[in-house]
Image (cartoon, rainbow, N blue to C red):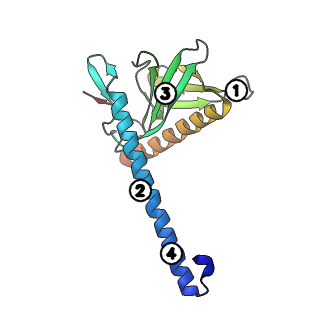
Amino acid sequence: MLSFSSDIAERQAITSALHTAEKIADEVNEAIRDQEGRERLHEISQELWIGQGRLDLTAPTRHLGARKLLKEGVLSKAKSGRRLRAVLCSDILVLMDEGEKGLYRVPISVTEIKIRPAKTGRDDPLIRVHLSYPRGGDVIVLRAANVREAKAWTEAIVEAGSKAREGIKSVDGSGVGVAIGMH
């Protein structure tokens, strides 16, 4: 339609309508992704326990509003090859034993994570997760299926950490503190 119209006002109206339709479609798609993410977090939460309490990944965060599922997939420990299901949320990284469906480690706040390049200096599928001092200054080295997947995980974790720190600072100015729902 746009290419057949010669009237400038009509072309502008069509262009405006097109942009409005694209914006609405983007918002609908985002709402669908959010709903699917909430449903998936609910499914995962059904099998996660810390001590006597169930870990509720659908609970809102302390400072960032509703928790969002950003990325999920299987990674393995670099040395042992142990397969872990990784779930990256807007405020935490959850590592679970793939076969047992239990937690491999207590959820890690994305604000406590620093990703460093692999020491080998070559392109390899390693993700070096450095945990800040409150967690003991630990390093977890994970292996992705390939270099591209490792890069995608690295970028997602870094971006989540950055957004979480920004959100926390805007609320209380400190840049720390994540709530994990327990039932």
Q: Residues within 10 Å of mark 1 (few under 14, many from 20)?
A: some
Q: Nearer the viewer, mark 1 or mark 2?
A: 2
Dot 3 and dot 1 residues touching (CB under 8 Å):
no
**Quarter of the image that includes the C terminus:** top left
Q: Position of residue 42 (x, y in %)?
A: 33, 33
User: Can I make out residue 93 in this image?
Assistant: yes
- Element at label 1: loop
> Which numbered dot is residue 16?
4
Task: Name the N-terminal-most of marks 3 and 1.
Answer: 3
Q: CA distance from mark 1 to mark 2?
A: 37 Å
How far separated are the C-alphas under marks 3 and 1?
19 Å
N-terminal-most mark, 4 or 2: 4
Q: Label 2 near label 3: C-beta < 8 Å?
A: no
Mark 3 or mark 4: which comes first in sequence?
A: 4
In 3D space, how far apart are the residues under numbered discs 3 and 2 (Cα atoms)? 27 Å
Is tag 1's residue or tag 2's residue first in the polypeptide sequence? 2
Q: Residue at x 30, y 16 (%)?
A: 51
Quadrant of the frame with the N terminus: bottom right
Point 32% across, 20% down: residue: 49
**Residue found 48% across the figure and 27% down from its top:** 86
